[in-house]
Amino acid sequence: MLRLVARNFVATLDPITLLVMFGQPAFLIVILGTMFSQLIPSVGASGSYVAYLVPGMIASQMITGAVLAGRIFWLDRRWAMVEQIFSGPFLRAEYLAALLLTALLFSLVGVGIMVLVALPLIGLTPLSPFEGFVILGTIALGSLCFGGLLIAIGGRIRSANLYFTIQSLLQYFLIFISTVYYPVTAKTPVVLRAIVYANPLTYAANTVRDGFTHSFGPSDLIGASILAGLAAITFGLAVLSFRSLEMGPVQ
C-alpha cells in the first residue's frame, strides 16, 4: 500500500497540478481576505472576515485531496494502469486503501499550505492538543468521505467527459453552497439554508472554525457524527464499486 501511495505522489507532483490544486485556494485567501475584509468588518466569533475564511479554506482541502485521488484512479483506468497494478503483487484492497490514504495526505499538504499563507495575514492562535486532534480528525473523515464518493463514482462510469463533469459540479456545489466562504444567518433564505446544512462540508468547516476560535460545542459532535456516518457509507460504496469493477479500456 505504501508503495502505491509513493507511486501516486510521484505521478501527481508536477508543477502545473500543484499550482492549480493548491495555488488557487492560497490565492483566494489572499485576494478574498484582503478585499472582503474592507466590506465585512466582522463575522461572529471569528472576528475579521479573513479569520473566518481561513478555517473554511482549510476544511475545503479535504475536497482537493479527494479530487486528486479520484483523478489518479480515473487516469489509471484510462491508461490501463489498473490492470497492470492488479497483475502485480497488489490486492484490490491495497489499491483502494492507497487511494484513500493519498486523498488524506494531499489534504494535509493543502492544510499546511493554507496555514503558511494565512500566517502573514492573521497569524494563528495556539491550539490545544485536543483542538488540533479534532481539526485533523475532521479533515481525515472528510477526505475519506469525499474520496470514497469520487472513487465509487469513478468505478461505475466509463466516460471521461461524464466523470470529470460530475466531479466539477460536485466540487463547486460542495464548496460554494456551504459555510466555507460565508456564514448562515437569520437573513439567509430558508431553502438555501436547508441546502447548506445538507452539505457535509458545512459541518467540517464549522468544526474546523470552532477549533480555531476555541469554541467547540454540541453542534460539532453532531457534525462529526454526520461526517463519520457519511464516510462509512461512501467507503462502503467504494468497496462495492471495486468488487464489481469492470476491466478494459474506458473513453
Image (spheres, rainbow, N blue to C red):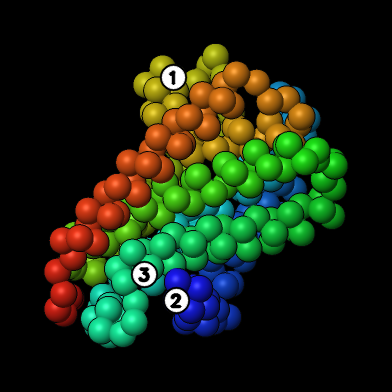
What residue is shown at x 40% (from left), y 35% (from top)?
A: 229
Q: Amino acid at mark 1?
A: Pro
Q: Return the residue nearer the eye: 93 or 20.
A: 93
Residue that badge 2 annotates: 4
Q: Is residue 221 above or below residue 92?
A: above
**Comes first in the chain, label 1 or label 2:** 2
Q: Return the residue nearer the eye: 173 or 142.
A: 142
What residue is shown at x 41% (from left), y 55% (from top)?
A: 147
Q: Amino acid at mark 3?
A: Tyr
* Disc 1, SS: loop
Dividing the picture into quadrants, the one containing residue 153 is: bottom left
**Comes first in the chain, label 3 or label 2:** 2
Image location of residue 44, percent across then percent down = 71, 24
Distance between the alpha carbons at the discs numbered 3 and 2 = 7 Å
Q: Residue furthest front?
A: 89
* Disc 3, SS: helix
Q: Which mark is residue 95?
A: 3
Distance between the alpha carbons at the discs numbered 1 and 2 = 46 Å
What residue is shown at x 16% (from left), y 79% (from top)?
A: 249
Q: Which mark is residue 189?
A: 1
Q: Amino acid at mark 2?
A: Leu
